[in-house]
Amino acid sequence: MCAFDNRASIANYYLVVLCIIAVILVNEAIAGDSSSASSWAQGYTLILMSNKDISEANEARDYVISQGGAIAILSPPHVMLGWIPAGISDKLLGKNGIEFITQSPIDIRGLKYQDEQSIAFINFFNYVASGDMEKEREASATAKGEPLINDALPHPGINREDFERNLQQLGIESFSWNNSDEMTGTVAYALFFVESNGTKDTSQYDWTAVDQQNTINRASSGLSWWVNKAVDYGVTLSFTPRIYPYNGVAAQQGYEPITHFSTEDSLWINQIMDNLGYTSGDKFEKVTAFNSWLKIQYKTNWAFSVFIAYNPLGAPTKFKDSIPTCAYSYLGGPYVQMLFRNCNWGEAAFGTVLSHETGHVFWACDEYYDFQDNYGCTSCGACAADGPRPTIVNANCEYCNINSVPCMMRHNEDALCPQTPKHIGWCAAFKKIYSDLYNGGLAEPGELDLAQDGGFCWLDWNIILKLDSCGNIIWKRDVDSKYVFHSIAATSDGGCIASGYRELPDYPAPGGFIAKFNSSGNVTWKREYGHDSVPEDESLAVTETNNGNYVTAGFMWNPNSNSVNCCYECMLITAFNSPGNIIWRRSFNELLPVPDDQNPEPHCHGYNNSQAYAVAPTLDGGVIMISTGNLVLKLNASGGLLWRRKFIGVGELNSITQTKDGGYIIAGWIPGSGGSDFFIVKLDNFGNVIWKRSIGGTGWDKAHSIIPTSDGGYIVSGGSGSFDSQYGDILLVKLNSSGNISLSRIFEDSSDNDWGKVSLEQTLDGGYAIEEGYLLKLDSKGLFSGCELISPLLSITVPSFYVSAPALYVEATSLWIWAPSFVMSAPTMNVYSNSCPWPP
């Protein structure tokens, strides 16, 4: 159960044995309706749940979102706040622990959930639903504060060893310090109500329970504002709080912050982090490690922290700095420092100031400029060159734009300019085409992989692009033409890894090739490898495993084919550690059963080719992969074969990935009435079939990519000839967790690109990215603003096939390996956009 973290103090948990009435009348509003003159509070809804833990609460949130709702605040395990579409309360009640929904204030005394954090956020809901929030805003509307001077500080450097040491002390070995790259998906945040215990400074100002609750109310208001704006952009966003109250052990320390300079904030922040067990490094390593823990604990995409010092009436409204300083944050995190009353904005505007500072945490830049005192933004160029979107300009900066428009990042205004959403990673649906002026052609269908920062690693033959979440190029690399890449994967350190082969004219040498690129696009290591001097080994797929290694899947030429090891081309699976050394390798080929009197055991009948061409990481540090012959193999972290399944009666398997429940989802095609249909099969973690589907129109349809979605369903894409005479149309189908269609789209593509060989990713904002020689971004509803998209009529059936577990020949083949030299350049690329998702 998530409650206030009072550590050594005893929390007040009251269990009142009262039942909540399950059926109520509510007046519901469409999520995020900003068309009326009232604020985002219109239609704000309280949902109470009987869930027992964070995971169950997260599933409930995802379910509400899948039904068209928007959840601003999730306080697990019992409270959700946000907006739901009209008329769906009855559908939600009883699902995923949801037992109560209202838009009217409620009496907390009769509730069975009396943990402090649940009560705090129910009180916040009452503050909104009663109209008290609107009254407070109206009363303080005339008090417009001054610009928040120097409040966007440069992103700090982090010592990785200290950062990792903090988490390892907690028993956490797998982590990322990219905690606030974009304001999308799910965000955990901690509110620290900093309290002095008088051990260093005289304690002058002590938080009260009333002012703490008021600050929670205003902070929640400021974050709900962002979620309401996100809805307008088709972005999924939800915040999950962790409260550290003033009377808990964690927030207690010896200093009275308001009597210090802002540059001394390490005094209280370090003590608070020490209280929580983060003792290595400086405040930046400690808070970054804490945020990573917060992200892991609440299973969110991102996390940040807010430290709030108390300065009631009678106390200064600024720190002791010569330049007025009251609230500030670091671009890209890890934290925000604020006061109860920030400069002359007043306590009622706390939420507005937090909205502004939260923008900075997610890389939004200041847009105000004071010409008299010469402070604020000073350029309309790129303002966060070291961030995840270094090419986005700050065109609304007042210094260089006399037509600057109202924006939260300008003067804390209730609006967003066109630039701020791009700064924080909100991108409307787009189609971007990348033209390589070096060879004068457009990109061919390649491969796309979602990076942790919300951007992408994209591969096109021997050109590698690192893109931000809006499709802008961060860096580009053209590798020596004698190397051909087949596959690319984003890596946990912000870089990319690509694999393929070296072409035959460069005899004699191994043919397999892998190269690791860091976050700046520089090669950290590269390897050629193979088992023989004849270079017919190739890597067809690559992935990063959950334990930080890299695995390539492909094939090797086998000059020693015999009656048992009978493949001319055998599967070759190779694992590399993070420095690029081979740690294990396996060669597999299927033995074809031909029982006869002389040899009743499985053995070769002729010669077969086995190529592994799809690979994905699994939770245990191993991989799952597909090979020719529709064979699925599960390997553990050491390369040991755990199980295998052969799908007979299926045309071809093309894509596989692990699902949240530990099972697997596979997509490909199966013979159908129009020639072929999409084929989707769900397996459990032992490879047993749970359900299966064939989906298609009147012509051929072949699925190429499938991924799980955040709501527990699946999205699958591929090529279709069912709806147009041209080959290569893109068919996109969204399935729920049971395998039933919830959304479908068809996109014309007259380019005839490899029978709809497309890569597919769900973006962190809940939308979808599709690659087929261009990058197509759709919003979370599968829509492209301003364009009429087609939802095709599809048939769905339960196909027939059978599954076997064939005998395999397994060998730890010997390999040659070395680090080759090659030429690499940064090619000139022209990027242009189409208004609708059709090719030029």
Image: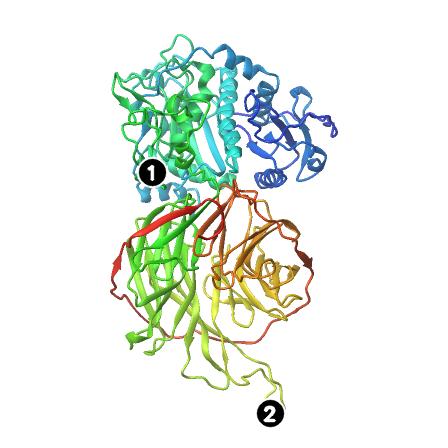
Q: Secondary structure at mark 1?
A: loop
The answer to which of 363 and 277 lies nearer the viewer is 363
- Residue 714's x, y, as percent? 58, 51
The answer to which of 529 and 714 lies nearer the viewer is 714
Q: Residue at coordinates 43% horizontally, 24% vertically from top-left?
A: 354
Q: Residue at coordinates 66% horizontally, 68% vertically from top-left?
A: 801
Above or below, 523 against 361 in this view is below
Tag of residue 598? 2
Residue 580, quarter of the rendered image:
bottom left
Above or below, 788 against 648 in this view is above
Identify the residue position indicated by label 1 in the image.
280
Q: Amino acid at mark 1?
A: Ser
Q: Quadrant of the N terminus?
A: top right
Residue 494 in view: no
- Residue 248's x, y, as percent? 48, 24
Distance, label 2 to label 1, CA atoms, is 69 Å
The answer to which of 279 and 152 lies nearer the viewer is 152
**808 horizontally vs 503: left or right:** right
Q: Earlier along the polypeptide chain: callout 2 or callout 1?
A: 1
- Residue 505's x, y, as percent? 30, 75
- Residue 89's x, y, as percent? 69, 33
Q: Amino acid at mark 2?
A: Gln
Nearest to viewer (mark 2 / mark 1): 2
Q: Residue at coordinates 32% horizontally, 55% vertically from top-left?
A: 517
Q: Identify the image's colour scheme: rainbow, by chain, secondary structure or one colour.
A: rainbow
Residue 122 in view: yes
**742 horizontally vs 184: left or right:** right
